[in-house]
Image: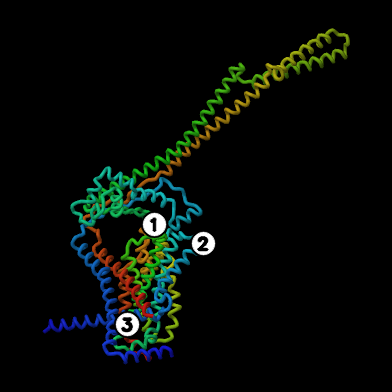
């Protein structure tokens, strides 16, 4: 209702106006649409037409050919333990210890350290700026410096390492402007990888073995100390083995007691048969003497200052310590052997089923593909902006 | 004489092409307006939807502590690449269901052909999806949730193939549903049944070898793997064949265009 009246009002106004004014309104509208079309055309030119043309010219006439050298290697352990339980499951879904070992190597190959080592043995900057290269693909990049960081950045563009999850093989690709350069660079990188792995092995080995060595040394020192203490004790006490000595004393006491008991029994017998026999008296004296002797021997064993009992206990403590130390040494030796074996087992190796190739044809840049990528990307961004503009434009005309 | 007529013919072709481009552009804007209207965000809802879904997925999965997902592919990259792709497929195909009947009123214009309508719809969906993807992608990439695009050709090419494939399938569906009304009821269930074969929630490389070669016959899988191939790093292998996709799309289009024209002539509406 409201709209209808408004429309009627509008038509009245338009009818009342001179024809030039309505024409101006129409012109204004057309001008606006035309302006929008011009803007869209300009954006199309800037994002799609011009970049695609430039890309076509650059990739067809100018871009320097690059030669790819590809190598594949495998990082393996000497003998990996059989996966069990969760580890087996992880292996089944593609995540395993081996991936970690490999990523150490691939990570190293793409590190600043690797670039620095490469630079020390190869004219890296020269390789990346051969006369065959063009202005935009050579190092230093157009309008950029030639600092080490830039070199590293450039290196990352030309060298790629990734692990194929299916085969476990790591794929190394190197692109330079000469096939020989690519091969040399790939070879050098693989040597570096090998060296990195060896260093890693050496460090792991020394780490584990060092600990075992120090354990063994400690145990051996303890054994020597125990032996030393025993020897000191012996020289001090003038005894080789107090337990044996005391056993001998005990034996004597035993013998004497037995003899005494026998004599006492004989005397009893004699006294019963002939109470006044002089033999009885002699026997009593002998028994007395024997008793004295027994007491004397007993005091040698225990009680008094020169008795054997304390030295026996010290001696036993010392021998026990020595035995413990001996066991320690034995177990440390076993641990040492185990550590050596484990280190051997954990040894990483680089196997190289596919050595770097010497390419005889340039495969980079992929000209048609790069051209298509520029076109498609430009077009996608253009479409994105176009739809935003249309959305916003229609929005304004609500 | 001959050169003159050739020039005339090429001029005619130029005029025809230009008018068709104009028609398709106008149809796209009309389509966008009718679908989202002028109110509130209007057209930008197309992009808003994707952002909302992505945010939801991130929140849900990080609450579950599962951001890292399977085989190194984060859930967010899987969701962002999968969602746009599946929406594109379902919208275009779903929209061509009985498209001739639904757009009958437009066909009274002499310059508007049913093919233009379907093409405009497919283009609008494709551009909208790619735009939505970019809008969702840029902040997520800046926050480090998504991988950087390492091959834009594969990414945009994958979307383009998805659009083309959906358009080509849509042509056939438009023709079939026009000729046989009952078949239009089957479109929605079939779209759901095909979901497992779209690679929405898995990657081909997760499957055992013997299934990989089977599932790769599905052109949709090829499309989504191509999209992912443009974003996911190299160590996450993707499998697709642009040649196979081209053949499938060309064949489906070649069948679809005459089929739609036949259906339009023989429809009773």
- What separation in Å lies between label 3 and label 1 (alpha carbons)? 45 Å
Instruction: Give left or right: position of A346 versus B265.
Output: right
Instruction: Determine which quarter of the picture holds residue B88.
Output: bottom left
> If you read the primary sequence from the N terminus, does the residue marked by circle 3 or circle 2 appear first?
2
- In the rendered view, tell whether residue A381 sits above or below residue B102: above
At a point 26% along the width and 43% down the height, the residue shown is A121
Q: Secondary structure at mark 1?
A: loop
Q: How far across and how far down the image is residue B166, in percent?
A: 36, 75
Q: Which residue is mark 1?
A: A165
In the image, are marks 3 and 1 on the same chain?
no
- What separation in Å lies between label 2 and label 1 (alpha carbons)? 29 Å
Q: Residue furthest left?
A: B1
- In the rendered view, tell whether residue A125 sits above or below residue B182: above
In the image, are marks 3 and 2 on the same chain?
yes
Q: Secondary structure at mark 3?
A: helix
Q: Which residue is mark 3?
A: B115
- What separation in Å lies between label 3 and label 2 (alpha carbons)? 47 Å
Q: Nearer the viewer, residue B213 or A302?
A: A302
- For disc 2, the neighbor class at 10 Å (few under 14, some 14 to 19, many from 20) is few
Q: How far across and how far down the image is residue B175, in percent?
A: 36, 84
- In the rendered view, tell whether residue A180 sits above or below residue A44: above
């Amino acid at each position: 209702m409201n709209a209808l009246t408004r429309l009627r009002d509008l038509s009245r106004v338009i009818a009342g106006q001179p024809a030039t004014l309505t024409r101006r309104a129409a012109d204004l509208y057309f001008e606006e649409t035309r302006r929008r079309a011009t803007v869209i055309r300009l954006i199309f030119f800037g994002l799609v037409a011009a970049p695609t043309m430039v890309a076509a010219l650059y990739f067809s006439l100018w871009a320097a050919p690059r030669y790819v050298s590809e190598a594949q290697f495998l990082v393996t352990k000497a003998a990996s333990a059989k996966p069990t339980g969760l580890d087996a499951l992880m292996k089944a879904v593609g995540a395993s210890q081996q991936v970690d070992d490999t990523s150490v190597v691939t990570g190293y190959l793409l590190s600043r350290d690797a670039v620095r080592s490469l630079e020390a043995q190869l004219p890296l900057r020269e390789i990346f700026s051969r006369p065959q290269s063009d202005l935009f693909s050579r190092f230093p990049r157009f309008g950029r410096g030639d600092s080490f960081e830039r070199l590293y950045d450039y290196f990352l563009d030309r060298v790629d390492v990734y692990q194929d999850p299916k085969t476990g093989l790591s794929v190394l690709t190197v692109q330079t402007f000469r096939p020989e350069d690519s091969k040399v660079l790939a070879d050098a990188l693989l040597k570096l990888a090998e060296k990195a792995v060896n260093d890693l092995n050496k460090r792991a080995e020394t780490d584990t073995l060092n600990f075992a060595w120090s354990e063994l040394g400690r145990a051996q020192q303890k054994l020597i100390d125990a032996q030393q203490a025993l020897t000191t004790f012996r020289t001090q006490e003038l005894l080789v083995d107090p337990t044996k000595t005391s056993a001998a004393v005990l034996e004597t006491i035993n013998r004497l007691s037995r003899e005494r008991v026998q004599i006492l029994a004989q005397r009893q017998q004699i006294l019963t048969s002939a109470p006044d026999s002089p033999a009885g008296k002699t026997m009593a004296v002998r028994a007395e003497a024997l008793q004295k002797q027994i007491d004397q021997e007993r005091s040698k064993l225990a009680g008094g200052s020169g008795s054997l009992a304390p030295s026996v206990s010290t001696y036993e403590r010392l021998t026990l310590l020595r035995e413990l130390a001996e066991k320690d040494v034995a177990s440390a030796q076993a641990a040492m052997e185990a550590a050596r074996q484990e280190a051997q087992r954990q040894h990483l190796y680089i196997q190289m089923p596919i050595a770097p190739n010497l390419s005889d044809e340039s495969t980079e840049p992929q000209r048609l593909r790069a051209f298509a990528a520029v076109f498609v990307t430009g077009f996608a961004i253009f479409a994105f902006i176009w739809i935003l503009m249309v959305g916003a434009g229609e929005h304004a005309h609500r | 004489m001959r050169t003159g007529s050739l020039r005339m013919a090429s001029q005619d072709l130029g005029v025809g092409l230009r008018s068709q481009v104009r028609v398709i552009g106008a149809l796209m804007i009309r389509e966008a307006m009718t679908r989202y209207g002028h109110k509130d965000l209007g057209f930008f809802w197309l992009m808003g939807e994707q952002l909302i879904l992505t945010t939801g997925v991130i929140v849900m999965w990080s609450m579950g502590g599962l951001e890292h997902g399977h085989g190194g592919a984060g859930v967010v990259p899987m969701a962002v690449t999968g969602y746009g792709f599946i929406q594109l497929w379902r919208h275009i195909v779903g929209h061509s269901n009985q498209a001739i009947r639904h757009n009958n009123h437009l066909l009274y214009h002499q310059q508007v052909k049913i093919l233009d309508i379907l093409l405009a719809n497919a283009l609008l969906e494709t551009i909208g999806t790619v735009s939505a993807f970019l809008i969702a992608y840029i902040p997520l990439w800046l926050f480090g949730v998504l991988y950087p695009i390492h091959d834009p050709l594969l990414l945009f090419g994958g979307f383009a193939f998805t659009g083309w494939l959906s358009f080509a399938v849509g042509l056939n569906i438009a023709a079939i549903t026009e000729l046989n009304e009952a078949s239009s009821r089957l479109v929605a269930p079939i779209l759901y049944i095909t979901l497992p074969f779209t690679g929405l929630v898995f990657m081909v490389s997760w499957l055992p070898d013997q299934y990989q070669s089977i599932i790769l016959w599905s052109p949709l899988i090829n499309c989504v793997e191509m999209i992912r191939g443009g974003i996911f790093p190299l160590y996450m292998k993707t499998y697709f064949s642009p040649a196979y996709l081209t053949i499938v799309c060309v064949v489906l289009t070649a069948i679809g265009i005459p089929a739609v024209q036949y259906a339009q002539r023989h429809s009773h509406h």
